[in-house]
Image (cartoon, rainbow, N blue to C red):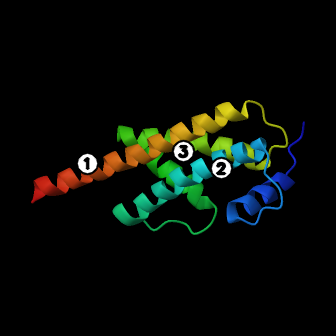
Amino acid sequence: MSFNWEEYLHLAEELTGIANSIAGEEARLRSTISRAYYAAFIRARNYLRVHQDIDLPRNGDVHRYVREYFDRSSNELHRMIANDLARLRISRNRADSDDIMTQLPVLARMSLKLAARVLANLDALLLQQSEVKRLQT
């Protein structure tokens, strides 16, 4: 059955506390996938901007740019981040546009795990950088 996109409005109303109705489970799962992607992507984008001092595109190209930056690296953590961001982006695009999705609970759980791994790997990169700076002083 095709997703009722109006459910996103119900979820938005629910999240702001002005709900006139309760959002359905499918809207919640789709939103979980989307928010998991953005948690990971924005954190990766900000890592490049702040800790690598990279001037990033200010349009939709930034998604590809961030993934490709990490993918081109020889650093294993960078490559893992790129791979996880790519998988998250595919799921997010599907959740935000496909009328019909199968295995939504599985995709939502996978998205949460992938996003958490991206965040953990970014934390590990920051620790590596701190250690390198400490050793240089």
**Mark nearer the N terminus (3 vs 1):** 3
Left or right relative to 120: residue 42: right
| C-alpha distance separating marks 1 and 2 | 29 Å
- Residue 115 lies, in percent from the top left, at 52, 44
Q: Which residue is mark 2?
A: 34
Give percent across and percent down for residue 45. 48, 59
Q: Identify the residue at horizontal 74%, vertical 43% (top origin).
A: 94
Q: Residue at x 84, y 38 (%)?
A: 100
> Which amino acid type is marked by label 2?
Ser
Amino acid type at circle 1 is Gln
**Earlier sequence position, callout 2 versus callout 3:** 2
* Left or right of residue 120: residue 24: right
User: Taking the image as drawn, is residue 3 in sight?
Assistant: yes
Q: Secondary structure at mark 1?
A: helix
Asked whether disc 2 touches disc 3, contact meaning CB atoms under 8 Å apart, the reply is no
- Of residues 123 and 135, the one drawn nearer to the viewer in this rendering: 123
Q: Which part of the image, by quadrant, shows the C terminus? A: bottom left
Q: Please, what secondary structure does the residue beneath circle 3 have?
A: helix
| Residue position for label 3 | 85
Q: CA distance from mark 3 to mark 1?
A: 21 Å
Mark 1 or mark 2: which is in front?
Answer: 2
| Residue type pointed to by label 3 | Leu
Q: Which residue is mark 1?
A: 128
Mark toward the viewer: 2 or 3: 2
